Amino acid sequence: MAFRKAVKGTVLIGGGAIATVFGLSQFSQYRNKHGTLHVEAAEPVPVPMKNHFPTREEQLLTLQSTSEFDVLVIGGGATGCGCALDAATRGLKTALLERDDFSSGTSSRSTKLIHGGVRYLQKAIMKLDFEQYKMVKEALRERANLLEIAPHLSAPLPIMLPVYKWWQLPYYWVGIKLYDLVAGNQCLKSSYVLSKSRALEFFPMLRKEKLVGAIVYYDGQHNDARMNLAIALTAARYGAATANYTEVLRLLKSTDPRSGRARVCGARCRDVLTGQEFDVKAKCVINATGPFTDSVRKMDDQEVPNICQPSAGVHIVMPGYYSPDNMGLLDPATSDGRVIFFLPWEKMTIAGTTDSPTDVTSHPIPTEEDVNFILSEVRNYLNCDVEVRRGDVLAAWSGIRPLVTDPNSKDTQSICRNHIVTVSDSGLVTIAGGKWTTYRAMAQDTIDTAIQTHGLKAGSSRTVGLQLEGAQDWSPTLYIRLVQDYGLESEVAQHLASTYGDKAFEVAKIAQVTGKRWPIVGKRLVSEFPYIEAEVVYGVKEYARTAVDMISRRTRLAFLNVQAAEEALPRIVDIMGKELNWNEQKKREELEAAKKFLYYEMGYKVKSDQLTDRSEITLVPSDIERYKKRFHMFDKEKKGFITIVDVQRVLESISVQIDENTLHDILNEVDLNKNGQVELNEFLQLMSAIQKGRVSGSRLAVLMKTAEENLGRRVVIPVDRSGGGL
């Protein structure tokens, strides 16, 4: 058996190598001639682009006052917004409805990659599957387009594939070179092989034992939620009436006078924020609702079989020191056969994803089992000097991937890896499946189908090379002008430029004066992230209507560090309250809703599960005595617990002052039974959890240790939240 596998592998490698050598020679000639990536733009757009996008209230008025649209898109994810942009730029009168926020579902919970899919190419070759090959080819073409139309939100990312067996080196090299070859003139950068020493130089935290070398290839990376929003805003600028928080209650139908058949002609909608209901009429209705595809299809026909087979993918975020600043890692074969990416993103590290069947829900929750699986796989690839701690998980989320079966296929049980466009008997157009990278091609196919089946008058798609919101006058050095013209911190300026593109100046103009010598403007929401208060004001202009919109999609705080997001919430709610005229009751509701979102959907719940009043104490006797001694330094009266007063007394004895609110927050992190005091048992549970790596960054632990070490000397004790994880 082993001999047969070896022979099979040799044949595959040899055959692939021959194809690769020929292909790469052609590819090399092309690269030498052309040198740079280029996407040929489509025909000019026949409609003017507005200097500003309408307010949400103006968009709702347009939806209610327009007698009939050409196209009504249901769904504000990447595909739905892509459909709206494609239709609007062809000159079609377009509407889009989203019951939550733009990108609130799967489109904001991806791996943040713009890629063709190395593993799909491998399957296409091994199984001689032409459909998968076409999907990879299309995705690589769309990857190039997306990097060009939104350069501020996306960039090429080198990804390392470490090799631990000699025979795998030529095998993976052939596969990656074929990936370059399929990309053709739209290859980002040519892949290359690294020796063991060079691989460790690029990725020093990599496991050294048995490492043979590595292969580095290039894919794209982006800020997914902001990219989705940029598509929506661009559609609005081209005249599409787009509205978030507008729910479709049912589809409207009329009888076709020629055929006598019922035809979908619009939707009954409800403004989720006000409760107002109204009808939106359209010649064609498009269902682009991702995991909720079947629920809209059943509004059209209750008897229609389900085609969506949802799959949950969990990601975790860890501190940036777990990966190099500009190099990702691919684990091509995990312990259960899945693929895991380990990527730098927004100065943090993303690891994921899992792939398991799930039920469709608007609020997917990451499980402890999935988090631990990812951590286990990460440990397999990192040096034993790097302790991969459960406590270093800063955020965790689950996204639902809407895999579909083709209803027109003979084998209805077979999952379709590409996208499908179907038209029901009553004319409802459904776009389902596909992937983030191919949203534009999916939208183009959908609108082509809509035009053909509904007799709409419009030309071909104009979205190839069409720049998205913020891309027009962006340049890599734009942030320097922000620093020079407005007095922003360099880190903040770079963040604004890479988030808003040329619209960063609009944010800078409304940034508040700090009152400091430097920076002159730009008050941060939290100290360790470059998000500023002016972004909250601008976010409301970008249709943000809830605190969750702000912490998860206008900024990415919730995806980067849930504790930082929670810390920023009160100020965010205050600013939004002022912009949207919220009363105190509404502010409290928003604050609670956002905390609930962080707790369940962004992994905060797993923090409380790591340290509870039921947590075991697994310390050895010597450690227990050491920690008791430290505790009794604060609990002088031996009452068995410490309060704010006890901590203040010790700090005063070493001439350190910390305000009472901060001390309250510090103790509250460890006060497991929430009785306003930290008991000895709670302190020992904390120290045990820290030793096991399940908790990190506890301010109380650091404060008490520092006080013990420096008692009698004047010291400065850090009390900033350390960025410790869940």
Image: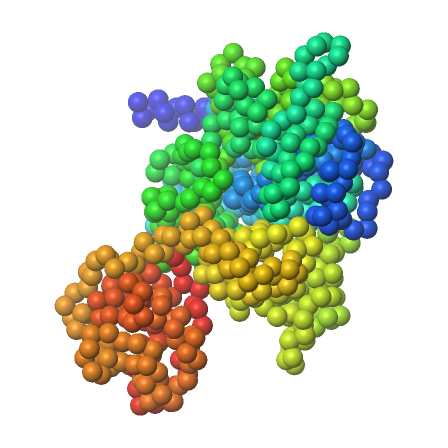
Estimate the x, y position of residue 655 in percent, counting from the top left. 38, 89
Estimate the x, y position of residue 343 in percent, counting from the top left. 50, 49
Any part of residue 340 in sight: no
Give the image quarter of residue 240.
top right
Closer to the camera, 290 or 7? 290
Report the quarter where the N terminus lies: top left
Estimate the x, y position of residue 278 in percent, counting from the top left. 68, 36
Which residue corresponds to the image point at 69% horizontal and 32% vertical from the top-left?
279
Residue most toward the top? 259
Say if 458 sits above or below 366 in the image: above
Residue most toward the left? 621
Which residue corresponds to the image point at 72% horizontal and 9% vertical from the top-left?
259
Which residue corresponds to the image point at 81% horizontal and 47% vertical from the top-left?
50
Q: Is residue 614 left or right of residue 4?
A: left
Report the quarter where the C terminus lies: bottom left
Give the image quarter of residue 331.
top left
- Count of numbered badges drawn on the protein: 0
Say if 251 sits above or below 547 in the image: above
Which residue corresponds to the image point at 64% horizontal and 35% vertical from the top-left?
269
Say if 135 sits above or below 353 in the image: above
Closer to the camera, 31 or 427? 427
Closer to the camera, 55 or 276? 276
Closer to the camera, 127 or 82? 82
Estimate the x, y position of residue 500 in percent, counting from the top left. 68, 55
Give the image quarter of residue 447.
top right
Say if 689 sits above or below 118 in the image: below
Any part of residue 521 in sight: yes
Colour scheme: rainbow
Q: Is residue 496 left or right of residue 605?
A: right
